[in-house]
Structure formats: C-alpha cells, structure tokens
Image (cartoon, helix red, strand yellow):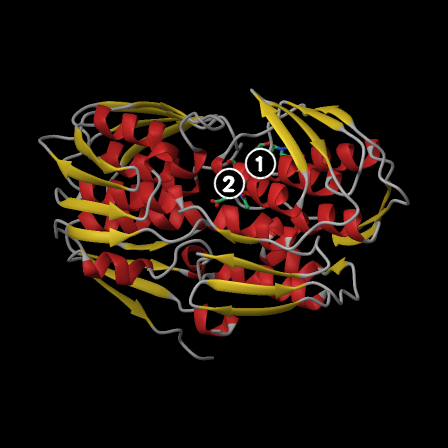
Amino acid sequence: MKSITSYTSEAFVIQGGKPLKGRVKVSGSKNASLPIIMASLLPREVSIIENVPDLLDTLTAFELIKSLGASVDFQNGVATIDARYLRDYKAPDEMVRRMRASVLVMGPLLAKFGKAVVSMPGGCSIGVRSIDQHLKVFEKGGANIEVKHGYIHLQVDKIKPVEHTFEVITVTGTENALMFLSGCERRSLLRNIALEPEVMDLVDVLKKMGVEIEIEDRTAVIRGSSELKSFKHTVIPDRIEAGTLMVAGFLTGGEVVLENTRVEHLGSVIEKLREAGAQVELLSLNSLRVKRDGDIKPLVISTAEYPGFPTDMQAQFMVLCCLAKGVSEIRENIFENRFQHVAELQRMGANIHVRDRTAIVKGVEKLSGAEVYSTDLRASASLVLAGLVAEGTTTVRDIHHLDRGYEKLEEKLRSLGATIERLPRREG
Ligand code: EPZ
C-alpha cells in the first residue's frame, strides 16, 4: 500500500493540442467507496470491498478507520477490513481537515458504540458545507450532542426510530443517517433523501449486512439490526471520472471509448455532451464511445441533485464552454463558491464573467498554456482539461487536490495520446 507521502507530488506539465484516441477503463467510485469503507465498521466481522480506487481520499479513509482499531489490507483495489476490535471513537482534526468526508464515521460509530467524537469540519474552498442536517437526524434518534473546543461530542444509549424530512438534499447527510439508523431495530422514515448512485451503492451494502431499506421517490423506510453481517461488495464505477474522460475526448477532438463505466449513471452528462455537439454512442451498459463532430456548441447548465446535472462536472464543462461557438450560461445551485477555477481559466485566455452563482462564458478561439493553480478537486481536473487543448505548455500546480479523487489520471490520459508529465515534489 503506497504511503500518503508518495502522493504529494506537485504539478502536471501538459503540452496541448493532441486529440485523445483509444480505450480507457474507468476506476471505482471515490464517493461510493468512502461511505462503504466507513460502513465496514458496522459488522463485527471481516468485510471485503472490491474495485476501490487507490487515491488520497480512500487512503485517508483507511488511515482513519485504522486509527479507530480496524485492520485494513488494501491490495489491487481490494480492501479487506476487520472491524472486530475497534478501540476508539475519535476522528482527529488533522484527519477531518484532510478529508471532510471523515464525518461519515459518525453514523457507524453511534450505531456500533453509541459514541463518537469528531472534529467539526471547517469550511472548504467550495463552500461552508455545514452538517446541520446530519446532526438533526442523530438528535432525533436520541443522541446527545455537544460542540466543545472544535469537536462534536455525540453519545446515544439506544437509538430511537426517527421520522425526518431533510431540509436540503444532502449526499453524506443521507449516508450518515442510513448508517446511524442501521443500529435501530425499529422502523425509521427519511424524506427528501439524496438519490445519487453512490448513496444507492451504500444502500446495497447495508442490505447485504441485513438492514431492511425500502426506497420510493425520495422517501426511505429503514429498519436496522443489532447483529449486522459482514459483506463483500464491488464498488460502482466513478461517474465523475467517466464524465471527465468523456469531456477530455470530446474537447480535444479525439475519439475515446470508456470501459467499466455505468451508462445509466451518466444520463445528464451524456445529454449535455450531445447538446454541445458530441457524438456519444452507447456500446453496452458498461461502455460508450465519445467523438467530436464539428464545433463545440454553447450550453445552458444548471447544476442539481441527481439525476440532474452534477455539480462535480460543472468545472469540467466550463472548459468546453470556453471554446464553444457562442455564449454559455452555467448556474451552480449546490455550492455557494464553486467557481474557483474561473480565475485560473481566465489566465489561459478564457472569457468568463461570474455574478452570484452564475457564470457567463463567451467562447474564444483558443486557450493559451500557462502556469495555473488547483484550488479543489474538480477545479484541478478542469485545469488539466484546459491544458490538454490549450496552445503550448500548461503547468497545473498543487496537483495533490487532483490526487484526492482521480486514480492514475496522467497514466490514463497518456495512454490516450496526451503529453502529460508529473513534476516530482521539490524537496525542502
Ligand atoms: C458530496 O458532498 C460529495 N462528496 C461531493 O463531491 C459532491 O459535490 C456533493 O455531495 C454534491 O453532490 C462525497 O460524497 C464524499 P451535500 P456532501 O451534503 O455530501 C448543504 C467531489 O468532488 N448542506 O450533498 O458534502 C451543503 O452546504 C466532492 O468528489 C447543508 O446545508 O454535499 C451544500 O450546499 C466535492 N447542511 C448542499 O447542501 C448539511 O447538513 C449539498 O451538500 C449538509 C449539506
């Protein structure tokens, strides 16, 4: 298992202008793996998770559950997790700051131990990202919650059945609630839940453990158990990596075949790509071909909860809009500050104006290579995409942001013909 330090490389250097051609396999989903790794704390036995991507966030999740006493063996995408001898229930600040999804440890620890101490996640570059909805469910389930010295102290004797309507649709809020209520043997009801494929993958795992979950529209009825069984599960493919690779193939004027993907999870992304002028041919339930066919057409994009257009694809599509023949409008409805990539794209010659949560993008003839800085995971992906199509050389710095959520991205892009090198971390 690679150590975290082997990931903190510094930059990608990209020569633009090469059309990407060939076949590429999509890795397992980061955002499905993270809750499932936390859920592996629930059974008192050994569980096996397959198709886990080897990237910074999953390694951090393994480090976190190991710090609680679980043992983890992670080889070739397969994680064998033994949660029989947990001895702690604290997620330290350093861990939560490194990965805010560490808050997903609250649900399982409360269900298993009735206790959790988790550092209050700070804000991040894309928004405040409060967890009030997570805490409301825990409170309704009987948990006593205190915030002291930056830590949330949660404690519950016997989890009570809950009836809760989420005030906002929250992916990890839904996931935390489902794992928490897996420890309650009476039926609970959750309304206005998130329906992302990653949430449904966790639901599949909880059902394998013996949790009863029925979902209709955005309502879930869930009945847990005191004896949750171990499970074996293959994580779904990463739909955001797939979308990013599709944009790369279309943007560079190439022809790319994606394998090991789930076409059914990509509906809104395929729709938008076709609107932009891409040829997207479905080859099977797990593979598709993307081809450029003429100019890039301008778009109107409004991000929404699944099955709407994913906020995690907004930055990548903005690069398409930068080179479209016309004016595009991108509205970011999920996070209040997810336009960090705009300033960096402007350094490459993009013509973008942001007002509140809307970006107006006027297409330009070309982007020019520059030295740009990543600010968050998907922004860094958009800068790599821009570098692939810009004139000249682009250096994308602080690439550790990208390493959090993309497995071997430069190797995948190189296999499709891109000229992209990873600059080693400068010591000292
Ligand atoms: C998940 O984050 C994903 N992360 C994010 O992916 C993704 O962008 C996001 O869902 C939206 O799809 C993981 O799954 C690990 P939310 P999450 O709770 O769960 C507000 C990536 O690039 N909200 O659905 O943190 C919140 O502020 C990452 O892989 C509350 O107000 O997002 C936001 O505006 C980035 N109170 C909105 O809801 C709460 O208690 C949606 O947030 C919870 C959320």
Tell me whether the residue at label 1 lies in contact with that at label 2, contact meaning CB atoms closer than 8 angstroms.
Answer: yes
Disc 2 Cβ-to-ligand 1 distance below 8 Å: yes
421 vs 65, left or right, is left
Residue found 87% across the figure and 36% down from its top: 142
Secondary element at tag 1:
helix
133 vs 382, left or right, is right
Residue found 50% across the figure and 46% down from its top: 31
The percent coordinates of residue 246 (x first, y second) are 26, 41
Spatial CA distance of label 1 from label 2 is 8 Å
Task: Please identify the residue farthest to the right as the structure is shown.
Answer: 157
**For residue 55, above or below residue 105:** below
**For residue 151, above or below residue 327:** below
Indicate which quadrant contains ligand 1: top right
Residue found 72% across the figure and 61% down from its top: 92
Q: Nearer the viewer, residue 160 or 418?
A: 160
Q: Which residue in the protein does label 1 denote?
A: 171
190 vs 419, left or right, is right
Q: Which mark is residue 235?
A: none
The percent coordinates of residue 128 (x first, y second) are 62, 38
Residue found 82% across the figure and 53% down from its top: 113
227 vs 298, left or right, is right
Q: How crowded is mark 2: few (under 14 residues within 10 Å), some or many (20 or more)?
A: many
- Residue 400, quarter of picture: bottom left
Q: Which of marks 1 and 2 is in front?
A: 2
Q: Which residue in the protein does label 2 denote?
A: 198
Residue type at the position of mark 1: Val
Disc 1 Cβ-to-ligand 1 distance below 8 Å: yes
Q: Which of marks 1 and 2 is nearer the N terminus?
A: 1
Residue type at the position of mark 2: Glu
